[in-house]
Each structure stands twice: as structure tokens, then as C-alpha cells.
């Protein structure tokens, strides 16, 4: 393991986080809420440590794939530990572990919160809390690669470890250019959303915070009333549409930019994603007619919640804990499926589900006709054996970890529905669960140690399991 390059890159990441805290610091100073010192006391020592790390001399500038996975896992833990400090120093949280849970939820774009009244926080802390959604949505390391030069092979190792989905590819030959294209699209779409929200009556500060949560598919609100507090059909429809847009593979937007419309609109994963959204919306709307007071009201509620849950954003306009069992079960299924690969959404990803379903069908066909050569195809192209194998291993690891995390947090003594959906919510980076962690509740019911376990679940889910495994593997530390 190339320890020197690992330390150097971690240093760059710390410095990047310090720079990203500057807008929150300026907002704190502008509103004079008293939380500016929390940022200052965090940024100065972090900048010193980051600068010291970046000065470590590197005898070998090449990194291995193993180094890339290790850096990504370590980096996300480090930025979370540092990012939680301003929240804790602002006196808005009872303990550092509460603040850590909140900021891990922010960076991993989970949106699960321990706060019952976020409006009591200062504007700077509220901004930083929501801004972490935007940073984590596209990926911290992707941002670092955009602003700091790095060897192309090295950057590709980092992308494979951080970008969600069964495979990671480049839009253009140079990875830094790919990062700039992705963040360019990301920032442009976010800016459009900010403008629209402001036009529809949302305050400027709220517009930015809610747009960050939507773009990163995070879900932090700036008040206890959430999105329902704005009581605006236009805002709900706008957010629903943009949540879905941010849940689409960003390669689609790049193809549209290149005017390759046929390739963009024939991606199998994206078509299935829209079909699932449409079918789920209609099914839930029909199921909640009596609860919602009519089909049109049901359609409005169903569309927003389906868009929010499948993209793992986690915003809520109604208490879906009160919905019929069919609708709640369908929402849990959407939590597991998640958004498209290469999007800012979490979950297992539509592409993985497609590969698993097609693999099962292929296996059945192979049993029926042993001599037949059966190939699993996605977008008309054969899926290579390595991708098939990694997808199956991921699915198996996913199910095992769900069981393990649920078993551990059950020591706090809450019911199965609460614990299981809390773990699904954190592991898939969604936000709300059911029962005691439903859309109108929060995660403050859990003890500090359980919140740490759920924080680990959030990080493991956001990095899609394997980087976190590698971080604690003894063989990964050998040269």
C-alpha cells in the first residue's frame, strides 16, 4: 500500500473541505446567529493538518486499485469527523455523536435526522448541513479531482470506488474532464431548481438549501414542517420532477449534450426506472383514494412520495405511516431498488436489479436447456462475467449486512418495523423509515452507540459496501 500518496490525497481532501466551509462561515457572519466561531475553530486546525499532509513527499506517485478503495473509505470518514465539528460547537446538538450522525447523513445524502426542530439552528449550520448533501451527491472525490490535478490512472481508481453502480466509466478520456462535465451538469440543474423554487414563492435561503437536498437526493429540510410547510402544488411538482431528473444516470445528460438522442433515450435502465415510477405512482394513488380524499389528491401525494423514495431523497409532504399496508410495503420495495447507477440517488440501483432478474431468468433457461448458451444482456450488449459476479456478490453482501445491522440496533429495544426500516433507510441513504422513524418522526430515539452503527451503515451504503470492507481488511494494510 502506498501510504505516502494516501496521506497526501487525504490532505488535499481536508483542504477542499475547509474551502467548502467558507460559504457557510460567510452566511453565519451575515446572519450573526452566533455559530461563526464553530466554523472558525474547525477550519483553522483542519487547514493546518491538511497542509501538513499534502507536504508528505511521494517516492511513488502511482496508486493501486486497493489504494483507491482505501482512500475513498478513509476520506469519507475523515470529512465526516471534521464536518461534524461546526454542528457540535454551535450548541445545537446534545453530543458530538448526534452531530456526527447528522453530518454523515448529510454527506451520504441520507437525510435522516435527530432534530425535531431544525429551524432552531443558526443559518450557517443549516446551510452547511444542506450543502453537504450537494457535495456528497456527486461525490467528494469527484469534486477533488475536478479542482486538483491528479494522474488519470489514479483518479480512475478513486472513481471506481466512489461512483455508485455496478460499473464506473469515463465520459471522456481524461477523468478530470469527466469530473468537470459531471459537476457542470449538476451545478446547472441545481441553479435552475433554485430559480424555480424562488419564483414559486420560496425564500432565497430556503431555495438553496432545498435545492441542495433535491440535487444530492438528500432530504434535509430547514424547518420541522418540511416541504408540506410551503403548501404549494407548484413547489411539490417541481421538486418531484427534479428528484426524478437527479435520479437518472448523468450519462444521459451528457449524451443529450452531444446530441446523441437515440443512445440517451434507449438506455434500458432509465426506461425501467421511469416505468417503475409511473406504475408505483398509479398503484399507490389508487390504494390511498379514501385516505387522500379523492384520486387527484392521491395522485399528487403518491407522485411526490414515489419520486422522493425511489430516488432516496426522503422529502415528505404527508405522513405515509398512516397509509394502507400495500402502499407502505411498496415504498419499502422502492427504498431497496433505488435510483439509476451514475445518479446522485442511493439504493441497490435499477441496473443491478435488472442484472439480477435477468441472471435468474438466464439460470432457469440454462437448467431447462443445458446445451443452450444463455447470455445476460443490458442495453443490447452482453454483461461480462466480472460484472455479473460482482453484482451477485454485492446483492449477497447487501442482504447479510441488512440483517447484521438490524440485529445490532435491535439492542435498543424498539420493534422490528422501526429497526428494519431505520437500517434500510440509512443503508440505502433515504431518510425516513416507518413507525417510530416515520416521515413525521426522527432518529433521536436511538442511543449514541446505535447512531454510530447507523452512521456506519450510511457510509457503507453510500460507498456500496466494498471500500468499507477493504478499510478494515488486514491484507489491505500489507505492502
Image (spheres, grey):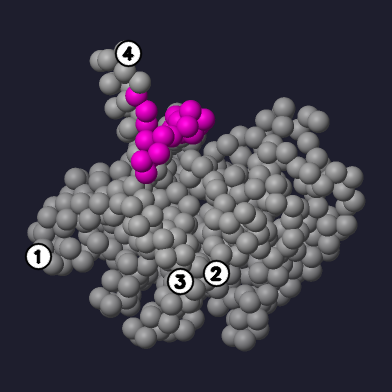
The residue wearing badge 4 is: 371
Which mark's residue is nearer the viewer, 4 or 2?
Answer: 4
Q: Name the disc covering residue 294, or none.
A: 1
Indicate yes or no whether the magenta region holds residue 390. yes
Q: Position of residue 336 (x, y in %)?
A: 37, 43
The residue wearing badge 2 is: 184
Q: Is residue 357 left or right of residue 7?
A: left
- Badge 3: residue crowd in 10 Å (few <14, some 14–19, many ≥20): some
Q: Which residues are magenta?
A: 374-395
Q: Which corner quadrant holds the N terminus?
A: top right
Tell me which label, 1 or 4, sits earlier in the chain. Answer: 1
Between the C-alphas of marks 1 and 3, the distance is 33 Å
**In the rendered image, which quarter is residue 222 located in?**
bottom left
Q: Nearer the viewer, residue 133 or 63?
A: 63
Q: Position of residue 412 (x, y in %)?
A: 46, 40
Residue for point 37% across, 86% down: 199
Query: Mark 1 near mark 4, Cβ–Cβ under 8 Å?
Result: no
Residue 163 visible somewhere in the drawing: yes
Residue for point 61% across, 49% down: 159
* SS type, badge 1: loop
Tell me which label, 4 or 2, sits earlier in the chain. Answer: 2
The residue wearing badge 3 is: 189
Q: Position of residue 351 (x, y in %)?
A: 39, 43
Residue for point 55% across, 69% down: 184
- Badge 2: residue crowd in 10 Å (few <14, some 14–19, many ≥20): few
Residue for point 43% across, 34% down: 383
Between the C-alphas of marks 2 and 1, the distance is 42 Å
Which mark's residue is nearer the viewer, 3 or 4?
Answer: 4
Amino acid at each position: 500500500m502506498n501510504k505516502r500518496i494516501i496521506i497526501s490525497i487525504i490532505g488535499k481532501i481536508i483542504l477542499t473541505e475547509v474551502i467548502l466551509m467558507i460559504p457557510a462561515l460567510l452566511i453565519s457572519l451575515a446572519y450573526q446567529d452566533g455559530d461563526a466561531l464553530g466554523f472558525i475553530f474547525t477550519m483553522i486546525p483542519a487547514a493546518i493538518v491538511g497542509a501538513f499532509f499534502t507536504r508528505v513527499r511521494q517516492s511513488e506517485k502511482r496508486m493501486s486499485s486497493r489504494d483507491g478503495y482505501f482512500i475513498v473509505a478513509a476520506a469519507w470518514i475523515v470529512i465526516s469527523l471534521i464536518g461534524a465539528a461546526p454542528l457540535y460547537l454551535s450548541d445545537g446538538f446534545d453530543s458530538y455523536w448526534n452531530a456526527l450522525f447528522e453530518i454523515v447523513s448529510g454527506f451520504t445524502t441520507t437525510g435522516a435526522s435527530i432534530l425535531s426542530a431544525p429551524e432552531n439552528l443558526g443559518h450557517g449550520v443549516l446551510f452547511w448541513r444542506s450543502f453537504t448533501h450537494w457535495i456528497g451527491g456527486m461525490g467528494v472525490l469527484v469534486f477533488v479531482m475536478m479542482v486538483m490535478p491528479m494522474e488519470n490512472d489514479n483518479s480512475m481508481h478513486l472513481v471506481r470506488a466512489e461512483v455508485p453502480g455496478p460499473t464506473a466509466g469515463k465520459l471522456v478520456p481524461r477523468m478530470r474532464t469527466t469530473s468537470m462535465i459531471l459537476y457542470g451538469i449538476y451545478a446547472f440543474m441545481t441553479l435552475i431548481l433554485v430559480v424555480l423554487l424562488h419564483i414559486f414563492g420560496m425564500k432565497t435561503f430556503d431555495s438553496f438549501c432545498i435545492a441542495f437536498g433535491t440535487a444530492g437526493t438528500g432530504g434535509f429540510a430547514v424547518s420541522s414542517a418540511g416541504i408540506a410547510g410551503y403548501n404549494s402544488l407548484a413547489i411539490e411538482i417541481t421538486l418531484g420532477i427534479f428528484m426524478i431528473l437527479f435520479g437518472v444516470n448523468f450519462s444521459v445528460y451528457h449524451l443529450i449534450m452531444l446530441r446523441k438522442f437515440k443512445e440517451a433515450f434507449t438506455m434500458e435502465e432509465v426506461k425501467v426506472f421511469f416505468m417503475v415510477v409511473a406504475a408505483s405512482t398509479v398503484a399507490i394513488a389508487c390504494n390511498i383514494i379514501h385516505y387522500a380524499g379523492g384520486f387527484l389528491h392521491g395522485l399528487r401525494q403518491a407522485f411526490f412520495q414515489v419520486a422522493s423514495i425511489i430516488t432516496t431523497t426522503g422529502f415528505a409532504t404527508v405522513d405515509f405511516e398512516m397509509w394502507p399496508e400495500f402502499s407502505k410495503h411498496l415504498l419499502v420495495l422502492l427504498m431497496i431498488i433505488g435510483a439509476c447507477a451514475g445518479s446522485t440517488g442511493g439504493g441497490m440501483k435499477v441496473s443491478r436489479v435488472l442484472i439480477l432478474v435477468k441472471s435468474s431468468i438466464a439460470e432457469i433457461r440454462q437448467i431447462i436447456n443445458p446445451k443452450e448458451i444463455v447470455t445476460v444482456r443490458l442495453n443490447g450488449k452482453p454483461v461480462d462475467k466480472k460484472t455479473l459476479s460482482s453484482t451477485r456478490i454485492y446483492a449477497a453482501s447487501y442482504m447479510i449486512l441488512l440483517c447484521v445491522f438490524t440485529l445490532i440496533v435491535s439492542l435498543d429495544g424498539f420493534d422490528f418495523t422501526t429497526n428494519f426500516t431505520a437500517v434500510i433507510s440509512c443503508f440505502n441513504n433515504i431518510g425516513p423509515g416507518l413507525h417510530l422513524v416515520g416521515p413525521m418522526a426522527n432518529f433521536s430515539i436511538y442511543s449514541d452507540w446505535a447512531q454510530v452503527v447507523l452512521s456506519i451503515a450510511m457510509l457503507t451504503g453510500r460507498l456500496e459496501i466494498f471500500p468499507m470492507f477493504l478499510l478494515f481488511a488486514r491484507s489491505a494494510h500489507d505492502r
